[in-house]
Amino acid sequence: MLLALRGMDALPIPILLSSLIPGLIIAFLREESVRTRRVLNLGGAGVKLALVGVMLWGVAEGERYEWRLSILPGLEISLVGDSLALLFITLSAVLWLVTTVYAIGYLEGSPNRNRFFSFFSLCVTATVGIAFAGDLFTFIIFYEALTWATYPLVVHRGSEAATRAGRIYLIYTVVGGTVLLFGIVWLYALTGTVAFVDGGALAHVPPEQYPALTGIFLVLLAGVGVKAALVPLHGWLPTAMVAPAPVSALLHAVAVVKAGAFGIVRILYSVFGIELSWTLGMAYVVIGAAAVTILYGSLRALYQDDLKRRLAFSTVSQVSYIALGTAMSGPLGAAGGLVHLVHQGLMKITLFFCAGNISETHGISRVSEMAGIGRRMPWTMAAFSIGALGMIGLPPIAGFISKWYLGVGAIEAGLPWIIGLLIASSLLNAAYFLPILKTAWLDPHPDASSGEGEDVIGIREAGPLLLLPTLATAALALGAGVFAEAEISPLRWVWMVVDRVFGLVQP
């Protein structure tokens, strides 16, 4: 059976259908069909994870899965399962499963759950399609599908604030998608190709096309930069934090911002190629934009009292590590940027799960209200602490691995100033995360009795459907750092990608 599946070029199709079909069926269920909805949600997530496991095994053994459907002369829908695609898809499959469990617990008793889980599944389908895309034409189909599948999740609560956030989200992302489409058409008109090729489809274009290609690169970067939350294209992201916690987790760790970051990776590695990107000076543009975004996001996070907004500006900063590393001209920096695609997802989803737990269990949404919450929710805050310390870059959590390779990659690329950027960023990370930990663990709870001490407050943790996914992702974030050298670690898989891009193996 496994040998048969390994030879199936069409394996990307059932992986897509494993979330598409449940999403479509759920849309037509009755709201009270709780058991059927759960079976479809968890069954689809389980099937997707199993199929991705088969593809992981095949790619590790040298397989490459390709499925193509011709649309017009020179244009086709192309799905390719290779090591870079699997890096993003595996993250999406794992986190979809844990987020589904979390969302079931979070939305228990809430209205419009069919609509939520239907679009939730469609959102994951679009994300996986983006990862599988074998060219820019296929990429933008799923990229735009992601915009429209995510919008109902942003406005799910139906409040005035949610409606406003959804409107802002659509304005940003639709404009960004239009700009991206313009760049794709321009590129096709100039070169006749929009394919993704190892080393870059444009690696051998004649120099007379360089001026036009510079403009095309900037247009494509602006198009994907909206979802990647590059400054000044980031404004939609903090506003979208009015959405439920599972949506916030999805936006920041699995889907939208990761789709934008993955688009930057594809432009650098599969369209232009890293050498041409440096020849045109565009790699330095990406590094500069990432550096500004890293510092800006961290500075804005410092002044946010709302916990989810603080985490949102943290995402603005942290996602740009991916662009920063992949734009460097060496394998070490690339490894740091690519592995952060996974590491940031594990840490950030943990933080948003924790924020949702605190809000749902105690009605607390502001940092200034979190005094003593660590003693009331010790497991949730232990998970939050792992995510926060990992974001700062403390070993042995996953974030340390990312920053280590970014640092040594900066030296390898002859960009020592990036070391200063990473230090400044880590200090800013500490400045907005450590006060949360101090308030939660060390400050007295405002309801504590002065005569009887804080024992009267007691422990009141989130329910198991909220707590278990939170602990699972925290454990994965810790394990990805502790076991970074293990054969099944994200870092080891990233070296397969780096080998394809640079033709080098792990030093």
Image (cartoon, rainbow, N blue to C red):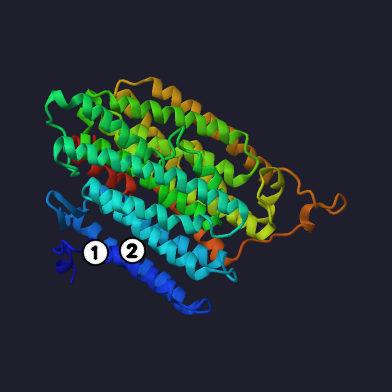
Which amino acid, by three-letter code, is at mark 2? Leu
Q: Secondary structure at mark 2?
A: helix
Q: Is residue 451 left or right of residue 161?
A: right
Mark nearer the N terminus (1 vs 2)? 1
- Disc ID at residue 496: none
Q: Nearer the viewer, residue 300 or 334?
A: 300
The residue drawn where x is 54% and y is 60% is 156
Could you tell me residue 310's position as x and y percent? 58, 41
**Residue matched to label 1:** 13
Task: Give the mark toward the camera: 1 or 2.
Answer: 1
Secondary structure beneath disc 1? helix
How far apart are the two marked residues, 1 and 2, measured between alpha carbons? 14 Å
Q: Please, is residue 298 above or below residue 339 in the view?
A: above
The percent position of residue 333, horizontal first and vertical second, equals 32, 32
> With 329 as the anchor, is 46 left or right in this view?
right
Categorize mark 1 by other alpha carbons within 10 Å: few (<14), some (14-19), many (20+): few
**Is disc 1 in contact with disc 2, using a CB cutoff of under 8 Å?**
no
Q: Nearer the viewer, residue 112 or 10?
A: 112
Quadrant of the frame with the N terminus: bottom left
Q: Which labelled disc corresponds to residue 49? A: 2
Location of residue 176 with respect to 276 vertically, above or below: below
Q: Is residue 503 visible?
A: no
Q: Quadrant of residue 495?
A: top left
